Structures are given as structure tokens and as C-alpha cells.
Image (tube, rainbow, N blue to C red):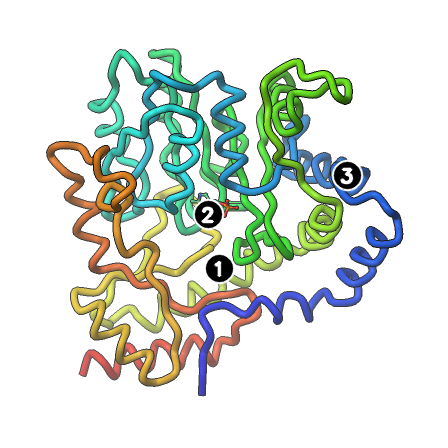
């Protein structure tokens, strides 16, 4: 018996006919980057967020980078962000030429602690990148209030939170700019890399559109110093098919997570908590255990694949340790040794959830 951590082929099989037809249409069209599929996907995704427009780009990392550049953030600027996130979040800030300032998280939701954000503000702070980690939104209202007070940009990192809501507002619709990733394992995943920048401001989206292709409005005339971060037609066509299934898939993730919650209620692990008013879309189902490594080995012995998101905080990694705050990040450092991501994907069976829970209970005895 093996219970995989994720099964991307199961998602493909569910939509095989439509995905195959969409891919063939692009192959036969002869138009492969930034064409009608990308434009249609941008409009459909923006409409789904309740925003006027969005810009498709080459990856989630690029979406963050281009959101920062569109917000005029660069050398000399500080950007507040968690250390407990995918390294891409900090990498994008550095690629923009700015300095990541790492702030600790809340131990219950794993998202930025707004009080600590306020304490970390300096004369150089220009932006906050709030990460909606594991599928639930960071607390944005206090961050938006700080941004108003101090003239900062709030950028939502939505790479793990397609469709998550807080008080009925969808992730990506609240901050000044938002970045999405369509890396294959995300809740909305392509068959390759892809990303998107969303914003309520058409001017900011226009700036991303220029920057993603050498600053061109007119071909071969660079109005801005830009880069190449184009989304391709094949990914956009596949993403259009999958976008129509996203909410159903998120509901399946929620049903599986609810089953885990029920079955693990009396176990030694701490199950994930959703903050009041938050709809969690369970990109990952992350528990905490005081004996994480032994539990992980026990599950592996019984054919159950797990993962750790993330084993080493960014400020403890060689490329970024010079940016570690002097007093450290106690919550981030503690939970890195306790977190364990259990198998979860929309097509997973309730029986497999029960098997995983069974072996966790067996470990406890
Ligand atoms: C995946 C991810 C990214 C980066 O997306 P890519 O498409 O892999 O570049 C950024 N932030 C978070 C939180 C992510 O999980």
C-alpha cells in the first residue's frame, strides 16, 4: 500500500478530454506565447476575483517580482515578510533589489503577526508581502491600516491560496497587488510554470504588462527597462479548463480536511486552525507534532508519504542568514521542527484519509 502525498495524474484524468482538446487547439493554432488564450485566461481569472484585469506571467516568483517592480520597490527599500514561507517570497524581494525584513508568525495560523509587523517598520519600509500560507489568508485588515498610515504597498502572496476567503473577500482582491503561482502542485496548477499579477488598479496591471516583455508597448521600443516573463498559450489554455473546476476541487480539499480534523481530534498531533471568518482551502494539511521526525518515519514505514513545508526557515539558510533579525524568530524556529504536511489532494479518497489517521493513532499507542 502506498498513499502518495499528491497525485497530479488523478487531476489530469478527471479532465482529460477537455485538457487534451485545449492543448491540441493551441498546438494547431501556431500562436504559442502571449496570445488569445492568455488574454482570455487573464480576463476569466480577474472576473473570478472580482477585479477589472490581471496580467499572466511566467511563474509565481516572477509575479511577486513584477508586483514589487510595478509598485516601484527597489534598491534601498525594506520589505516586510515572513521567514516561514516558500523561499520564492524572499527571493523575489531580493531580485527586486530590496531587502527582506523577516517578521515572526502567529503559532496558530502560521501567518504574519500584525503586531510584530508594526514593530518592524522603519524609515525605509516600503511594502509588506503577506503570505496566505497553506491555504488560509493572513490577517490583512491591520496590515492595510498600517499601509494607509505609512504609505506602504501590501502585496498578497496568493501562491497557496487560490479561492481562500476572509469575511467573504477572496485572496488577491484586498491588497494593492497580488501574486499567484500556477506551479503544477498548487490548487490551480498548470502543466509547467505559470503565474499572474492581480490588482484593483488598471495602471499597475498595465505596468506589469510592459515589464513582463522588455517594457514594450510597441514592439521593439522599450518604454521601461523590463524582462522576459511571458505566460505561454498552452499553460493558459489548460488553466482556463482547470479554473472552472477550482471551486469544486477546493470543496473536496475542505471535506478531506474536515475528515482529518474529526479522526485526529484525540491524537497527539495539533490539527490546523482556521482564523474566525476564514475559509481555508487546504493547499496543505499541516499538523504539529512534538515527535515529528519519528512520526514521519512511522508513516513512511507504512507507505504514507509526507512532506515538510518548510524544514529550514529562510533566515537560517546560507543565502539569507545575513538577514536574520538579531533576536531571531522564536515561533518560526520552533515550529520548523514540529510541522508535518499530510497527504491531501482533491481526488484523494476518504478511506486513504482514514488510513493515514489510523497510523497516526497507532504511533500514539
Ligand atoms: C509556490 C510558491 C511561490 C512561487 O511560485 P513559483 O511559481 O514556484 O515561482 C511563491 N510563494 C509561495 C508561498 C509559494 O508556495
Which quarter shows the N terminus?
A: bottom left
Q: Residue at x 75, y 45 (%)?
A: 233
Of all residues, the one furthest to the left in this rendering is: 327
Q: Residue at x 26, y 33 (%)?
A: 102
Number of residues whose C-alpha sits closer than 10 Å to that of mark 2, classed few (under 14), some (14–19) or many (20 or more): many
Q: For mark 3, give the secondary structure.
A: helix
Which residue is the site of mark 1? 254
Which residue is the site of mark 3? 40
Between 338 and 228, which is closer to the camera in this rendering? 228
Whole-angstrom CA distance, mark 1 to mark 3, is 29 Å
Of all residues, the one furthest to the front in this rendering is: 220
Label 3 vs 2, first from the N-terminus: 3
Whole-angstrom CA distance, mark 2 to mark 1, is 9 Å
Whether disc 2's CB lies below 8 Å from ligand 1 is answered no
Q: For mark 2, give the secondary structure.
A: strand
The answer to whether mark 2 and mark 1 are in CB contact below 8 A is: yes
Give above or below for 38 relative to 149.
below
Which residue is the site of mark 2? 279
Residue 250 relative to residue 269: left or right? right
Q: Residue at x 82, y 51 (%)?
A: 26
| Disc sitting over residue 309 in the figure | none
Number of residues whose C-alpha sits closer than 10 Å to that of mark 3, classed few (under 14), some (14–19) or many (20 or more): some
Q: Which of the 4 image quarters holds residue 20?
A: bottom right
Of all residues, the one furthest to the bottom in this rendering is: 1
Q: Nearer the viewer, mark 1 or mark 3?
A: 3
Residue 281 relative to residue 296: left or right? right
Residue 76 relative to residue 67: left or right? left
Amino acid at each position: 500500500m502506498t498513499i502518495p502525498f499528491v497525485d497530479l495524474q488523478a487531476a489530469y484524468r478527471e479532465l482529460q478530454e477537455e485538457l487534451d482538446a485545449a492543448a491540441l487547439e493551441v498546438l494547431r493554432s501556431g500562436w504559442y506565447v502571449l496570445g488569445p488564450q492568455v488574454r482570455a485566461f487573464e480576463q476569466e481569472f480577474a472576473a473570478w476575483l472580482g477585479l477589472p484585469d490581471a496580467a499572466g506571467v511566467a511563474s509565481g516568483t516572477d509575479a511577486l517580482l513584477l508586483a514589487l517592480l510595478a509598485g516601484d520597490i527597489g534598491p534601498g527599500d525594506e520589505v516586510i515578510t515572513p521567514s516561514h514561507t516558500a523561499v520564492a517570497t524572499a527571493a523575489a524581494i531580493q531580485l527586486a533589489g530590496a531587502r527582506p525584513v523577516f517578521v515572526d508568525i502567529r503559532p496558530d495560523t502560521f501567518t504574519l503577526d500584525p503586531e510584530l509587523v508594526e514593530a518592524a517598520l522603519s524609515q525605509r519600509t516600503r511594502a509588506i508581502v503577506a503570505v496566505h500560507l497553506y491555504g488560509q489568508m493572513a490577517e490583512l485588515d491591520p496590515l492595510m491600516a498600517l499601509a494607509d498610515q505609512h504609505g506602504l504597498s501590501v502585496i498578497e502572496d496568493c501562491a497557496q491560496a487560490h479561492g481562500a476567503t476572509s469575511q467573504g473577500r477572496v485572496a488577491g482582491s484586498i491588497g494593492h497587488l497580488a501574486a499567484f503561482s500556477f506551479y503544477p502542485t498548487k490548487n490551480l496548477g498548470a502543466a509547467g510554470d505559470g503565474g499572474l499579477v492581480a490588482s484593483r488598479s488598471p495602471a499597475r496591471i498595465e505596468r506589469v504588462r510592459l515589464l513582463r516583455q522588455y517594457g514594450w508597448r510597441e514592439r521593439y521600443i522599450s518604454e521601461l527597462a523590463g524582462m522576459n516573463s511571458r505566460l505561454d498559450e498552452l499553460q493558459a489554455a489548460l488553466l482556463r479548463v482547470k479554473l472552472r473546476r477550482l471551486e469544486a476541487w477546493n470543496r473536496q480539499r475542505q471535506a478531506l480536511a474536515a475528515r482529518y480534523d474529526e479522526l485526529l481530534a484525540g491524537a497527539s498531533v495539533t490539527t490546523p486552525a482556521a482564523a474566525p471568518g476564514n475559509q481555508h482551502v487546504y493547499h496543505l494539511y499541516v499538523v504539529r507534532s512534538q515527535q515529528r521526525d519519528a512520526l514521519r518515519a512511522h508513516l513512511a514505514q507504512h507507505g504514507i508519504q509526507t512532506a515538510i513545508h518548510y524544514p529550514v526557515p529562510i533566515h537560517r539558510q546560507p543565502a539569507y542568514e545575513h538577514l536574520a533579525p538579531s533576536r531571531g524568530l522564536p515561533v518560526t524556529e520552533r515550529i520548523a521542527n514540529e510541522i508535518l504536511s499530510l497527504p491531501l489532494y482533491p481526488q484523494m479518497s476518504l478511506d486513504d484519509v482514514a488510513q493515514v489517521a489510523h497510523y497516526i493513532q497507532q504511533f500514539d499507542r
